[in-house]
Image (tube, helix red, strand yellow):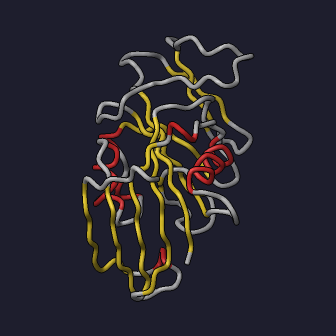
Amino acid sequence: MIEATLCFVLRESEPAGTAETTEPDKYGEIAETATTDTPAEPSETDNTSYPQPATTDSSGDVLLIEKRRGLGEGWYNGPGGKLEPGETPRECAVRETREEVGLETDPDALEYAGELTFLLDEEVHTVCHVFRTTEFAGEPRPSDEARPEWVPVEEVPYDQMWEDDRLWLPGVLEGDTVAGEFHFAGGPPLDEAAFVDHELEWGVSFESR
């Protein structure tokens, strides 16, 4: 069984009408977006401050990644990955977000939003811990694992994501909590198996997480 995390970072949408400039990264792709109306950044010497861009709502943006390799290559999702030995889910979410997109997140500010269990041919394949946060430091940058992109919450490309994401992610981005079980058949690998069934429970309390 695989134990993994996903972390969905949210911010306020950029003001309408701001001009954007982009620069290619070392992969020849756009790494960051700058505007001509950018709020003041925290002091460079204050490495412990975390800006608080937005409360979770449908008018903001969510940071998604396009997977460059591995399970789900070419699909969109939140930053995340497998837990390392001795690592807690929160520690994993912070590390994976840093490694994949270069953002620093405060583990105490991560909100536990969901626990998703994926079964392949009726055997547990992956348990995924889902976090969300509006507190982060830095600017997204690409890595060997992922290409980051700020996407309006109402424009999340569910047709380019795991088939089950459209069932639970909208609620999570709206601030709800969820426990889900998703059944796949015909694998391995999981991303080539057929999605056949699911169960969802909303409004779950994860206070102990």
Name the image quarter holding the N terminus. bottom right
In this rendering, the answer to whether 151 lies above or below 200 is above
Q: Name which residue lies at 47% across and 54% down.
A: 77
Q: Position of residue 67 (x, y in %)?
A: 57, 57
Instruction: Quadrant for residue 60, please give it.
Output: top left
Choose between 67 and 206: the one closer to the eye.
Answer: 206
Locate residue 71, reporting x and y percent: 56, 69
Task: Tell how many labels.
Answer: 0
Q: Nearer the viewer, residue 154 or 119?
A: 119
Which residue occupies 36% across, 29% down?
A: 55
Identify the residue at the far front of this view: 208
| Left/right of residue 49 with respect to residue 167 in the rendered view | right
Q: Quadrant of residue 4?
A: bottom right
Q: Nearer the viewer, residue 138 or 178?
A: 178
Q: Is residue 9 above or below residue 164?
A: above
Residue 114 location, x and y as percent? 39, 56
Query: Where does residue 175 sit, x and y in percent of width and height?
Result: 31, 42
Residue depicted at 70% across the width and 53% down the height: 144
User: Which residue is pictured at 25% across the width and 53% down the height?
Assistant: 203
